[in-house]
Image (spheres, grey):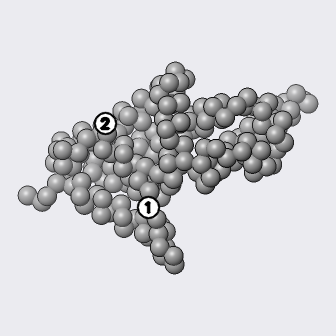
């Protein structure tokens, strides 16, 4: 029974470290001290290094759930929305509301290189690209997305950063800016 508790504690510590690393990287950038991540996670530095021998190991461990979340959001939008356009719009709204741009800015190009070079991440990365391509192609086919907008453009828009002015509701400002972007992507009514 004790080994089950130890494994559960180790899993909990690992999960806490990854959650703290995501927050720290998003808010302070890739060079945040590892001790700060450990403190934020509520674990000792030794515990952090037992799970992750270096910063690259933390980045690799973050990349999989990050990509899995993107794939899940895209798949859900595709499954639940009545058109490719509404799926694409929903997905881009969710990406902006989740502040993916802030995380990408803090982690790039290190995370991008890590994702591209890590064979463990190839499958989940491909799933994200497949969903984006399917949404883009379907929106083109239904005539709702401008033909000069491709999958790479949509991928770039996933990480748009939106800043709200002091006193402005961040969620509302984000929604408005994404709506403006979507208006620019949509085909002109014919």
**How far across and down, in percent of the image, does residue 85 sit?**
27, 51
Residue toward you, 92 or 112: 112
Task: Locate residue 121 relative to residue 5 in the image: left or right.
Answer: left
- Residue extending farthest to the left is 190
The residue lying toward the viewer, choosing from 54 and 50, is: 54
Q: Is residue 82 above or below residue 132?
A: below
Q: Which of marks 1 and 2 is nearer the N terminus?
A: 2
Q: Which of 78 and 150 is in front in this view?
A: 150
In which quadrant is the C terminus drawn?
bottom left
Height in image: 2 above or below 159? above
Q: Name the residue under label 2.
A: 133
**In contact (CB < 8 Å): disc 1 and disc 2:** no
- Between circles 1 and 2, the one closer to the viewer is 1
Q: Is residue 114 above or below residue 32?
A: above
Q: Is mark 1 on a helix, strand or loop?
A: loop
**Residue that sits furthest to the right in the current view:** 2
Question: Looking at the rendered structure, which numbered label has been put on residue 162?
Answer: 1
Q: Which mark is residue 60?
A: none
**Who's the residue at 49% across and 31% down the image?**
113
Residue sitting at x 52%, y 27%: 121
Residue 80: image x %, image y %? 38, 49
Would residue 83 be found to the left or right of residue 99 on screen? left
Mark 1: few/some/many CA within 10 Å (<14, 14-19, 20+): some
As measured in the structure, the alpha-carbon distance from the residue carrying label 1 to the one carrying label 2 is 24 Å
Residue 19 in view here: no
The N terminus sits in image quarter? top right
| Position in image of residue 37 (x %, y %) | 73, 46
């Amino acid at each position: 029974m004790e080994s089950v508790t130890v494994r559960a504690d180790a899993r909990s510590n690992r999960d806490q470290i990854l959650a703290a690393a995501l927050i720290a990287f998003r808010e302070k950038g890739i060079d945040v001290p590892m001790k700060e991540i450990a403190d934020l996670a509520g674990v000792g530095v030794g515990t952090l290094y037992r799970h992750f021998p270096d910063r690259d190991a933390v980045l690799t461990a973050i990349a999989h759930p990050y990509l899995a979340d993107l794939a899940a959001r895209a798949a859900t939008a595709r499954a639940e929305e009545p058109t490719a356009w509404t799926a694409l719009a929903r997905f881009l709204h969710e990406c902006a509301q989740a502040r993916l741009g802030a995380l990408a800015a803090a982690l790039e190009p290190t995370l991008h290189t890590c994702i591209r070079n890590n064979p463990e991440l190839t499958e989940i990365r491909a799933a994200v690209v497949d969903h984006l391509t399917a949404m883009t192609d379907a929106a083109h086919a239904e005539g709702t997305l401008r033909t000069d907008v491709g999958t790479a453009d949509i991928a770039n828009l996933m990480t748009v950063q939106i800043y709200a002015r002091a006193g402005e509701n961040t969620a509302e400002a984000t929604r408005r800016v994404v709506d403006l972007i979507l208006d620019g992507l949509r085909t002109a009514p014919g």
